[in-house]
Amino acid sequence: MTKVINVDWNRYARKYDMLMRFNPFYQQLQQEVLDRAKKWSISAGDRIADIGAGTGNYSTAIAAIFPQAQVIHVDRDEGMCSVTEVKKQERHLSNLEIWNVSVDELQIEPESLQGCLCIHSLYTFSQPEQLLKAIHSWLKPGGYGIFVDPGRMVKVREWQMAIGWQMVKKYGLRQTLHIMKEGREISHQNQQISKYQANGTYWTHTPEEFEYAIASAGFNITESRLCFRKISDMVVAVKA
Ligand SMILES: C[S@@+](CC[C@H](N)C(=O)[O-])C[C@H]1O[C@@H](n2cnc3c(N)ncnc32)[C@H](O)[C@@H]1O
């Protein structure tokens, strides 16, 4: 079945980094992922891919952590990639390649990657299980994967309340209301995401189903946990 995607990632891109600035749960998740990636053993010339990499909050951080590696940022949205390009220039990340391409057209040499990240992107792809198998084939034996995916429905109101509460404590009510107004596009796109989760266009799963998909792709799972207010599943894995 061909899936029609109507979330406007390009509009989302213009406001996306408000998540990085103001959403404490997004910041915490980024830290949790980077803490795990920092344990990877990466040699000079190794290649690491971030797939569905958005505005590069992970790919740019990984490129900075591993200057000896070549990091490939993959995202099919032009707006997301142009925000990343600005960060790449500002942070002088000459080891970051930005590939503005869909996963459906992605060509990576078998056994050429030492690490791969998919953070909150698998659920949007038309064939996430197939992509997991492809990632497994692109990794070298011993290569690493970190996969995070929102398995459960995104409940926009609950998120607004949770983030709003944290922000009021930090910035006060007036400033919080101003920031929330600025970030309306984020809520709007998340409402769209939630609709596509509800009608089955986007992948939803239990933690067990997520683990199963990753194990079925051939990975050995080294850690599996809930994250991001328990709506997301994180699996850390290795190719044997
Ligand atoms: C929710 S964002 C996650 C971005 C980033 N990983 C993060 O956590 O900040 C999902 C990203 O997947 C990208 N995406 C959706 N479908 C795609 C596809 N078929 N190929 C490549 N990227 C895609 C979107 O453009 C968007 O940037």
Image (cartoon, rainbow, N blue to C red):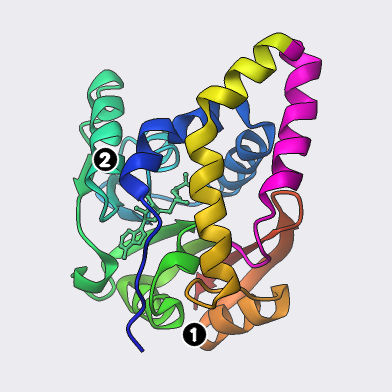
- Whether residue 166 sits left or right of residue 21 in the image: it is right
For disc 1, the neighbor class at 10 Å (few under 14, some 14 to 19, many from 20) is some
Q: Name the kind of residue labelled 2 in the image.
A: Gly
Which SS class for mark 1? loop
Dot placed on the residue nearer the N-terminal end, 1 or 2: 2
Which residue matches tag 1? 218
Location of residue 73 in the rendering, given as x and y in whole percent from the top left corner: 29, 49
Residue 192 vs residue 213, the one in the foreground: 192
Residue 47: image x %, image y %? 29, 54
Q: Quadrant of the N terminus?
A: bottom left
Residue receiving disc 2? 79
Residues marked 1 and 2 touching at CB (< 8 Å): no
> How would you classify the magenta stretch by its main secondary structure?
helix
Q: Label 1 to label 2, Cα distance in Å?
A: 33 Å
As shown in the figure, which amino acid type bears the numbered disc 1? Gly
Ligand 1 image-quadrant field: bottom left
Q: Residue at x 38, y 46 (%)?
A: 54
